[in-house]
Image (cartoon, rainbow, N blue to C red):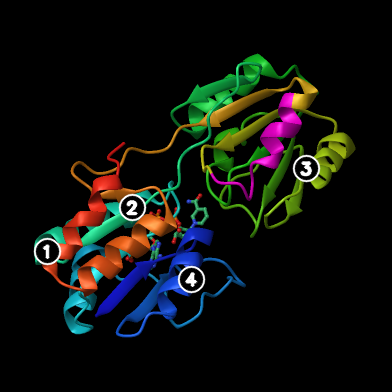
């Protein structure tokens, strides 16, 4: 069975690694091709956009793909929307693999906002002028803070951020996972007063939230974009493995693993 994994995440790599051991599966991982030096999963890897819904549909037909797992990042909503549309059009089974979002503890001072523009506005209320704000938004979203010349921004991302940047800034090139010790050192060195992040979920980048909690700092948390209506979703790599293996052993077995699949 030919399986396409839409990747770019640790879960995508873990899934491809696990499926590579299975006889009878041909697994290709697709990466967007944006990161200069991506971590490549085992097996066949393709890179670069498909060219929208039509391009993805043409790829699925040409490669005779029989199942797709969208293991892209929770904020890669365009790719997920395209996958839902193309697979729906062709009747190719699709599972979306989404790790759970982060949950605040009672003692946390989190401010949930819908997008980067609202996050920038929240920062002006939460961080006094002259304070340092740590942005961990990846490449995108930083431009929303470009108009603020009253605060200093420490901008951490794997590759340099896109678009306009705030005038008072420090760029930190770094790739997770981050340990609690390393996060404490970053917060201390830059005297971080407020953290702005996206609700990516997962363990690899969660240490900053513990550090903020221990230091009693406010966290501006950008909510995930919603999943397309009707998408079939699992929260775990194990759930995705079970779904793929179920499909490869016949249509009746293919439906049973979906019992533990949640639709958030
Ligand atoms: P996006 O806005 O949803 O996607 C923009 C376009 O990039 C898509 O329309 C598609 O181009 C192409 N694309 C995205 N993921 C692809 C994939 N796995 N394979 C082939 N083409 C892909 O996505 P994004 O937020 O820019 O993220 C790009 C990639 O980085 C994703 O694969 C995601 O898993 C990874 N990533 C994203 C974040 C984040 O915070 N957004 C964080 C960590 C990793 P076409 O329309 O031409 O097909």
**What is the CA distance from the residue labelled 3 to the residue labelled 2?**
32 Å
Q: Mark 2 near ligand 1 (CB under 8 Å)?
A: yes
The residue carrying pointer 2 sits among few (fewer than 14), some (14 to 19) or many (20 or more) residues within 10 Å by Cα, namely few
Q: Quadrant of ligand 1?
A: bottom left
Contact (Cβ within 8 Å) of mark 2 with mark 4: no
Quadrant assignment, res 180: top right
Of pointers 4 and 3, the one earlier in the residue sequence: 4
Residue with the mark numbered 4? 33
The x and y percentages for residue 205 are: 64, 46
Of pointers 1 and 2, the one earlier in the residue sequence: 2
Contact (Cβ within 8 Å) of mark 1 with mark 3: no
Q: Residue at x 27, y 52 (%)?
A: 81
Q: Which residues are magenta?
A: 202-213
Assess whether residue 54 is covered by the magenta stretch.
no
The x and y percentages for residue 216 are: 75, 20
Residue with the mark numbered 2? 78
Q: Nearer the viewer, residue 121 or 232?
A: 232
Q: Is residue 127 above or below residue 257?
A: above
Closer to the camera: disc 1 or disc 4? Answer: 1
Q: Nearer the viewer, residue 199 or 193?
A: 199
**What is the CA distance from the residue labelled 2 to the residue labelled 4?**
15 Å
Of pointers 2 and 4, the one earlier in the residue sequence: 4
Residue with the mark numbered 1? 252
Can you say which quadrant of the picture contains the N terminus? bottom left
Q: Nearer the viewer, residue 251 or 137?
A: 251
Q: Mark 4 near ligand 1 (CB under 8 Å)?
A: yes
Q: Mark 1 near ligand 1 (CB under 8 Å)?
A: no
**What is the CA distance from the residue labelled 4 to the residue labelled 3?**
30 Å
Of pointers 1 and 4, the one earlier in the residue sequence: 4
**Residue 180 shows which numbered tag?**
3
Of pointers 3 and 2, the one earlier in the residue sequence: 2
SS at mark 4 in the image: loop
């Amino acid at each position: 069975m030919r399986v396409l994994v839409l990747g770019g995440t640790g879960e995508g790599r873990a899934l491809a690694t696990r499926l590579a051991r299975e006889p009878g599966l041909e697994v290709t991982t697709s990466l967007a091709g944006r990161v200069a030096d991506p971590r490549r999963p085992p097996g066949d890897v393709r890179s670069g956009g498909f060219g929208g819904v039509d391009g993805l549909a043409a790829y699925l037909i040409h490669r005779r793909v029989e199942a797709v797992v969208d293991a892209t990042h929770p904020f890669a909503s365009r790719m997920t929307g395209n996958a839902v549309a193309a697979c729906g059009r062709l009747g190719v089974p699709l599972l979306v693999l989404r790790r759970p979002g982060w949950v605040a503890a009672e003692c946390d001072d989190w401010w949930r906002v819908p997008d980067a523009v609202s996050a920038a506005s929240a920062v002006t209320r939460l961080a006094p002028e002259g304070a340092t704000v740590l942005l961990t938004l990846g490449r995108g979203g930083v431009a929303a803070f470009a108009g603020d010349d009253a605060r200093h921004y420490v901008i951490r991302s794997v590759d340099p951020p896109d678009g306009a940047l705030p005038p008072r800034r420090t760029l930190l090139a770094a790739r997770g996972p981050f340990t609690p010790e390393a996060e404490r050192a970053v917060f201390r060195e830059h005297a971080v007063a407020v953290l702005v992040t996206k609700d990516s979920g997962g363990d690899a980048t969660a240490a900053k939230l513990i550090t903020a909690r221990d230091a009693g700092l406010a966290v501006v948390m950008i909510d995930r974009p919603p999943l397309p209506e009707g998408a079939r979703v699992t929260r775990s790599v194990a759930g995705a493995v079970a779904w793929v293996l179920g499909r490869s052993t016949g249509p009746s077995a293919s439906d049973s693993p979906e019992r533990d699949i949640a639709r958030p």
